[in-house]
């Protein structure tokens, strides 16, 4: 793929995309499939048989399974070879993260170690820190944790009170404070800890070893879900941290924290795909066994609707995840070619896609919540029983909308990041938006006779982008500097952006898929239903935003324009969903 086909973050809002320029899961190579199968086999043999015992809070069992994954090399997939890893592409890392997502609370422990517990040192650490710590974290010799949240500092991470004071001899930072909700705390060997040095306003980051004097780890929290993961408070009482364990520069901790959260959001977006596919497979198998009124419940239209909708949302989200993952790989290669440090180049490439990171965290976590909830409903009374795996799926899913930045924060970030990039001149969002606003009476849906299936879908998506531009421009024009403070309006625009990016990624994927495998009506049905529903969601969000900020006269003109842009041909969604459901009912598992 050529660099000029690689969009900047948020640039999808203003550009049309060639389906041949994106990566789709149908293009995984044999090595990637082999790695995925290795992860899948490990979960089936080592994790799933131990889920009940893990949910009882068996720290030693969780630790031993994590160590076994390290022995197999699974912890080093994202780590360069010179630090005892395998140096795989970002797409491959995301595929592994997807498969691990089917491992319930083990997934949380594993991803916390491989991601936020290891990568701050890999990305921002110096060579000595990488050789001392990353080489051991990549093999599972050490297990890692990430310590940012405090009792008074959650979403507002930089308000943390943990303090680090330089010792009189200048050899140590004396660390005092408290952290909470720390995953892997009960058995971690290393901790990435964020604290303010002296009277600094901005955090710094440190590597702390759990066995150092003054590090006190509390008991495991009792949680709604992910019960197998160790989540504790950690207290620091005059802990002597060698000065060489400062990560990056003094005051760089907040930047490190935000960048690592971008990475965490993206990998969570992959994790939820594996969890969703597992739950969908469990649900269809139950539906194909359970009889009511003399027939299998998989024969009922309501059950077919649920199965189809679960598939549509999961498949669409998956399309977007691997699209942006390849974009990140291309940017990583570009930075590497320019001589950038391998760690900084990797995290800068991931952080660049801040708009997409936030979209996929929000959409993915809400997709999985939908899937898990409908999975319980398909199981009926048995779904409420702890005897069935869907009980665990339901409880474990709920945390995803909270950690790695709440969905409320991330919805705001979608719009903030997209508009900031436009203001910086990375792409022209407001010029075309102003033109649309000044010519409301000339807006049409640009429908043409004889359109092919994909020409029509891409026209719809182009109109979605026009609707976003129009509402964003109108709101920013009226609200001015208070625009981002009107969170309900920002949320409306964010929802429009998310639906558009997912819809475009899905349509591009299926179009490219056909060029590789030929036309398949079921996949066109997935596109038709998703785009039809997305367009109607966009219309409502646009109108809600307009009526929230615009005076009556201009509001009516804007709404008329939105009605034109969101005009979508009717779809027989009942038949389309039944076609989709028929495939999974026949296959008896997720096989899309």
Image: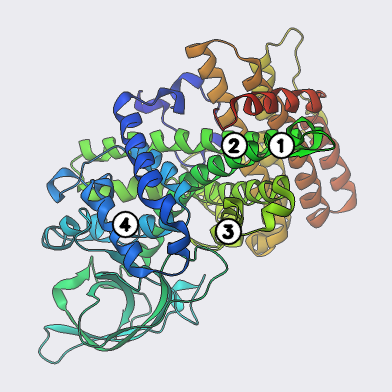
Earlier in the chain: of badge 3 and badge 2, it is 3
Question: Disc 4 to disc 3, how far (Cα)?
Answer: 26 Å
The residue wearing badge 3 is 401
Q: Which residue does the image show at 52% across and 36% down from the upper left? A: 318
Q: Which mark's residue is nearer the viewer, 1 or 3?
A: 3
Secondary structure of the residue carrying tag 2 is helix
Q: Is residue 360 visible?
A: yes
**Could you tell which of marks 2 and 4 lies nearer the N-terminus?**
4
Badge nearest the viewer, 4 or 3: 4
Examine the rendering and report whether any part of residue 421 can be seen: no
Upstream in sequence: badge 4 or badge 3 = 4
Residue 577 rendering spot, x and y as whole percentages: 73, 28
Instruction: Confirm or deny contact between disc 1 and disc 2 (CB under 8 A).
Output: yes
Q: Which residue is mark 1?
A: 534
Secondary structure state at the residue bearing disc 3 = helix
Determine whether label 1 and label 3 are within 8 Å by CB. Answer: no
- Relative height, residue 285 to residue 27 (above, below): below
Residue 236 position by quadrant: bottom left
x and y percent of residue 290 in the render?
71, 39
Q: Hey, which residue is sitting farthest front in the picture?
A: 294
Q: CA distance from mark 1 to mark 3?
A: 21 Å
Front residue of 121 and 489: 121
Q: Earlier in the sequence, mark 1 or mark 3?
A: 3
Image check: 322 left or right of 93?
Answer: right
- Density class for disc 4 (Cα within 10 Å; few <14, some 14-19, many ≥20) is some
Q: Earlier in the sequence, mark 1 or mark 2?
A: 2
- SS at mark 4 in the image: helix
Task: Identify the residue position indicated by label 2 in the image.
Answer: 502
Tell which of 43 and 85 is nearer to you.
Answer: 43
Q: CA distance from mark 4 to mark 1?
A: 42 Å
Horizontal side, residue 187 vs residue 280: left or right: left
Find disc 4 in the rendering and name its residue: 65
């Amino acid at each position: 793929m050529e660099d000029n086909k690689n969009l900047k973050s948020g640039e999808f809002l203003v550009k049309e995309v060639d389906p041949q320029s994106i990566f789709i899961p149908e293009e995984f190579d044999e090595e990637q499939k082999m790695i995925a199968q290795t992860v899948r086999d490990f979960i089936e043999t080592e994790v799933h048989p131990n889920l009940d015992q893990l949910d009882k809070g068996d720290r030693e069992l969780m630790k031993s399974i994590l160590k076994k994954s390290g022995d197999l090399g699974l912890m080093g997939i994202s780590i360069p070879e010179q630090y005892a890893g395998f140096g795989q592409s970002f797409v491959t890392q995301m595929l592994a993260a997807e498969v691990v997502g089917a491992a319930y609370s083990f997934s949380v422990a594993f991803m916390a170690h491989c991601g936020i517990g290891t990568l701050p040192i890999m990305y921002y650490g110096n060579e000595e820190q990488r050789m001392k710590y990353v080489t051991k974290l990549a093999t599972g010799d050490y297990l890692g944790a990430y310590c940012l949240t405090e009792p008074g500092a959650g979403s507002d991470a930089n308000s943390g009170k943990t303090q680090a004071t330089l010792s009189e001899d200048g050899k140590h930072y004396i660390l005092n404070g408290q952290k909470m909700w720390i995953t892997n705390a009960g058995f971690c060997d290393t901790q990435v800890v964020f604290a303010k040095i002296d009277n600094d306003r901005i955090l710094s980051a440190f590597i702390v070893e759990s066995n150092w004097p003054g590090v006190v780890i509390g008991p495991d929290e009792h949680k709604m879900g992910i019960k197998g993961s160790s989540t504790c408070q950690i207290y620091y009482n005059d802990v002597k941290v060698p000065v060489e364990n400062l990560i990056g520069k003094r005051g760089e901790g907040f930047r490190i924290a935000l960048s690592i959260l971008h990475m965490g959001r993206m990998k969570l977006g992959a994790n939820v795909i594996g969890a969703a596919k597992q739950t969908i497979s469990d649900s269809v198998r139950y539906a194909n066994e359970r009889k009511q009124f003399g027939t299998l419940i998989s024969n009922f239209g309501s059950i077919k609707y649920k199965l189809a909708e679960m598939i549509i949302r999961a498949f669409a989200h998956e399309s977007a995840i691997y699209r942006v993952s390849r974009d990140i790989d291309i940017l990583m290669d570009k930075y590497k070619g320019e001589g950038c440090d391998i760690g900084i180049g990797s995290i800068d490439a991931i952080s660049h896609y801040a708009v997409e990171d936030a979209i996929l965290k929000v959409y993915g976590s809400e997709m999985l919540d939908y899937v898990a909830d409908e999975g319980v409903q398909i199981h009926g009374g048995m779904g409420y029983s702890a005897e069935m795996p869907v009980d665990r799926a339901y409880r474990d899913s709920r945390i995803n909308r909270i950690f790695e930045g709440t969905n409320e924060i991330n919805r705001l970030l979608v719009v903030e990041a997209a508009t900031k990039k436009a203001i910086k001149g990375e792409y022209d969002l407001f010029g075309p938006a102003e033109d649309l606003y000044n010519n409301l009476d000339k807006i049409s849906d640009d429908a043409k006779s004889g359109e092919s299936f994909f020409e029509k879908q891409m026209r719809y998506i182009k109109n979605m982008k026009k609707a976003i531009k129009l509402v964003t421009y109108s709101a920013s024009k009226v609200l001015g500097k208070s625009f981002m403070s009107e969170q309900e309006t920002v949320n409306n625009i964010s929802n429009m952006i998310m639906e558009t990016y997912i819809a475009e990624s899905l349509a591009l994927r299926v179009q490219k898929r056909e060029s590789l495998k030929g036309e398949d009506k079921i996949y066109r049905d997935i596109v038709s239903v998703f785009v039809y529903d997305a367009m109607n969601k966009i219309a409502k969000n646009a109108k809600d935003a307009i009526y929230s900020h615009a005076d009556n006269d201009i509001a009516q003109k804007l709404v008329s324009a939105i009605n034109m842009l969101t005009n979508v041909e009717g779809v027989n969604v009942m038949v389309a969903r039944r076609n989709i459901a028929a495939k999974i009912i026949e296959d008896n598992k997720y096989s899309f």
